[in-house]
Amino acid sequence: MIHDEEQPVPVISIPTPHQPWAGGHYSSAVRAGDWIVLAGQVGVDPASGQPVAGGLLEQAGQALANVEAILGDVESSWADVAKVTVFVAEDDPGMMPALNALYAEHLGEHRPARTTVGVAWLPLRTLVEFEVWVYRPEAR
């Protein structure tokens, strides 16, 4: 049996004018076939490029707003999100119910797969970061 060699899926950077801050050599969003992957978003104010004042919930609210702005840049919404990874640099696990409530407020009835990971630190000493995977077929 002869197999055609599969061509690699190109990874293409997508412009994201609403990206508030980039701390390294990476794209804020890339398309790989039917998937769009957003770089992790932290609670940075787009106007100042600095973390928002307050604690975990204030930063989470800003990070989720940043995700929503970039979802708009890539012509998607929470309804297209298949997977979210949440990185939390907060020592108090008692904050999780409030974080979960804020998350649910932003996503509404949509329930993508999710992983939450406790970490030692995040960029700019922020307390939470959201990484998002969007499934949006190119032919849509």
Image (spheres, grey):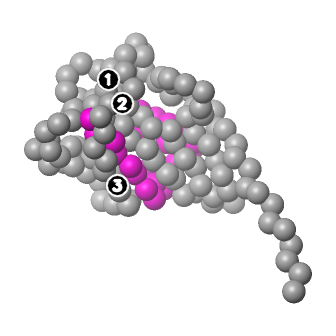
In the image, residue 80 lies in the stretch drawn in magenta: yes
User: Which quadrant would residue 115 be assigned to in this image?
Assistant: bottom left
Q: Amino acid at mark 1?
A: Arg
Residue sitting at x 55%, y 47%: 37
Q: Position of residue 1 (x, y in %)?
A: 87, 86
**How far is disc 1 from disc 2 in space, using C-alphas?**
5 Å
Most extreme residue toward the bottom is 1
In this rendering, is residue 95 above or below 123? below
Please state the extent of the stretch shown in magenta in the rendering.
65-89
Which residue bears the numbered disc 2? 122
Which residue bears the numbered disc 3? 115
Mark 1 Cα within 10 Å, few/some/many (few <14, many 20+)? few
CB under 8 Å between discs 3 and 2: no
CB under 8 Å between discs 1 and 2: yes
Residue 65 appears in the rendering: no
Which residue bears the numbered disc 1? 125
Number of dots carrying numbers: 3
In this rendering, is residue 113 above or below 2? above
Q: Secondary structure at mark 1?
A: helix
In the image, residue 112 lies in the stretch drawn in magenta: no
Residue sitting at x 17%, y 36%: 91
